[in-house]
Amino acid sequence: MKIDPSRARDRMVDLHIVRRGIDDPRVVEAMRAVPREAFVDPGFEEFAYEDTALSIGEGQTISQPYIVALMMAQAEIEPGDTVLEIGTGSGYAAAVLSRIAAHVYTIERHATLANEARKRFAKLGYDNLDIRIGDGTKGWPEAGPFDAILVAAGGPGVPQALKEQLDLGGHMVIPIGPAGEQRLLKVTRVNATTFEEHDLGGVRFVPLIGEHARKEEPSQPA
Ligand code: SAM
């Protein structure tokens, strides 16, 4: 029997997003609206509404829906906000962000993934996103400052360039620590030089690779 994607999506959102305490109505509505099945590799559509990360090539993953929703809710995004995402991957999280923010800038280091994501945005008619191929640890200075920054890969610390590009009062959500042992941090810019940090719990992201993070991809990704 063929699965109805919108029913599967609603069920996933009810079970894994709402029941687990994500109550920001705009995040919940965006998760109900964006077709995650359009962001997974062909043949994996039937797994799109399980609350798990899935492989998308280049040793990378589309993140678990609950974590995507948690990061967005913690970033406290308002409708007029400009948001930066590091680690476009499949483009799914950027697509969800584009439904709750005014404009999304997203950076991916793998050209193959970025090009696929760009095609998906065009196919779905999502036109308030800009995508760049490059090292996201340097941010996107000419588009900042950003009201929120979401980092979808784990590095050793918060890159200085991203701190500088976060607007006053803005929130950054970023996994920090070695593969398999990262903590998800919410970093709030209080003033020009003061940043408050809150630990949101343990997470497992692929590594953040770049000038202001790890230099090399490990031969055996965790
Ligand atoms: N947000 C993605 C989604 O919804 O599919 C999932 C992202 S995946 C967990 C992390 C991504 O970060 C990978 O595609 C990886 O290539 C990318 N990445 C790692 N380091 C990066 C960097 N310095 N700049 C840009 N992208 C980076």
Image: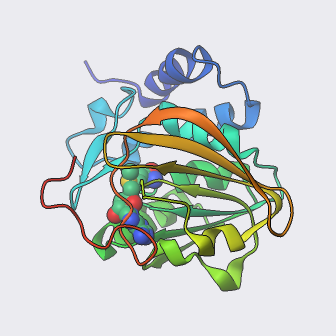
Total labels drawn: 0
The location of residue 217, given as percent across then percent down, is: 23, 66
Left or right of 89 in this view: 192: right
Picture quadrant of residue 109: bottom left
Q: Residue at x 74, y 37 (%)?
A: 26
Q: Is residue 7 above or below residue 29?
A: above
The location of residue 144, given as percent across then percent down, is: 72, 76
Left or right of 78 in this view: 97: left
* Residue 119 visible somewhere in the drawing: no
Q: Residue at x 41, y 36 (%)?
A: 64
Q: Residue at x 60, y 79 (%)?
A: 140
> Relative to the observer, which residue lies in front, 147 or 62?
147
The location of residue 203, given as percent across then percent down, is: 43, 36
Image quarter hosting the N terminus: top left
> Relative to the observer, which residue lies in front, 68 or 50?
68
Picture quadrant of residue 139: bottom right
Q: Residue furthest bottom?
A: 142
Left or right of 133 in this view: 113: left
> Relative to the observer, which residue lies in front, 148 or 94?
148
Q: Is residue 152 above or below residue 86?
A: above
* Residue 48 visible somewhere in the drawing: yes
Q: Residue at x 40, y 25 (%)?
A: 4
Q: Is residue 167 above or below residue 184?
A: below
- Ligand 1's image quarter is bottom left
Q: Residue furthest left?
A: 219
Left or right of 33 in this view: 146: right
Colouring method of the image: rainbow
Q: Residue furthest front?
A: 194
